[in-house]
Image (cartoon, coloured by chain):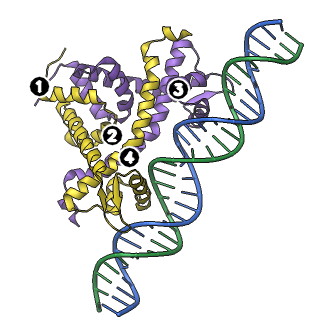
Chain colours: A purple, B yellow, C green, D blue
Amino acid sequence: MTDSRRPAASRTRPVAFRRIRADHQTELAEDYVELIADLLDERGEARGTDIAKRLGVSNATVVKTLRRLQENRLIHQEPYRSVFLTDVGRKMANEGRRRHKIVERLLVALGVKPEIARIDAEGLEHHVSAHTLDAMKRFLKQGVRKT
Amino acid sequence: MTDSRRPAASRTRPVAFRRIRADHQTELAEDYVELIADLLDERGEARGTDIAKRLGVSNATVVKTLRRLQENRLIHQEPYRSVFLTDVGRKMANEGRRRHKIVERLLVALGVKPEIARIDAEGLEHHVSAHTLDAMKRFLKQGVRKT
DNA sequence: TCCAGATTTTAGCATTGGCTAAACTTTTGT
DNA sequence: ACAAAAGTTTAGCCAATGCTAAAATCTGGA
């Protein structure tokens, strides 16, 4: 077909879009475990209501999502009790925080206002590949260079 | 409550998460119109099947999504015919391309490999605020410097 | 202790975005 | 011109993520 004559961008696209769809699946899970980790650190427990408040969604939605996270062994919880992270969940939370920090620091280094950097980083962190994250880290560490 | 004693990050979160959920709603629409714009530029028409191939989803899914886009006046199409963009759709596509280009160029400037920059930019472009985009533009324009 | 108020979960609904298989058009080759 | 092939749409399914209202459970104060 005309395929070989198409610009490379066209052929890479399905890959990119497939990854985005995959990322979206883990995105919510990551947000939850990070938030739960924060709450546990801050106050030793993480109740559904607190999660709901910070995420800006209803209680019922949180309950339903937590059930799924529990099925995926990221958290455990008994009815009417606080949520806790499994080892897997804790690891995911740490990984998320790490990414978040790097992205946020990068934005600030670029001159983005801190409050905005925090908000944007929340959305961006889930779509940064390992390679890009490394590049960001390198950039932050060693000042700069440019073409 | 304890609210005033919580770190600022906690209080900003609902804002961030709400924006992310909102972004997700427009994300698919933006991807579609950008893709349609590309196809129209490349070959003068954009058929459902081409969109499906590039997005990596089934034909049926594309049909269903296009119906929604048409309801939202972003595209128009007659059955069994090519899709076209409305003025609104065209504007959205241009805006998306602009953001995409800046993000991709920034990643490359940071040392990310071009293929990876392209893929990552596809996921990142929807979560970059106007302010952050400006910062990126400024950074790209004036070479570099660092704290 | 025990019940009233607060908290949490369940029930039930809607929308989005995915799929496959079947039905329907359009196009093409003889 | 028309039948077979190719392309497109419809039908009907599923899972995820959101909601409100009702039911269930927990807890603190009398």
User: Is label 1 in a helix, a strand or a loop?
Assistant: loop
- Residue drawn at x 42%, y 27% is B16
- For disc 4, the marked residue is B28
Label number found at residue B123? 2
Mark 2 and mark 4: Cα distance apart in space = 11 Å
- Quadrant position of the C terminus of chain A in the picture: top left
User: Is label 2 in a helix, a strand or a loop?
Assistant: helix
- Res. B50 image quadrant: bottom left
Mark 1 and mark 4: Cα distance apart in space = 33 Å
- Can you tell which of label 1 and label 3 is closer to the viewer? 1
- For disc 1, the marked residue is B142
- Name the foreground residue: A45 vs A58: A58
Mark 1 and mark 3: Cα distance apart in space = 45 Å
Amino acid beneath label 1 = Gln
Q: Where residue A107 appears, x then y in whole percent?
A: 27, 23
Q: Numbered disc 4: what chain?
A: B
- For disc 3, the marked residue is A87
- Res. A59 image quadrant: top right
Q: Is residue A40 left or right of residue A120?
A: right
User: Is label 3 in a helix, a strand or a loop?
Assistant: helix
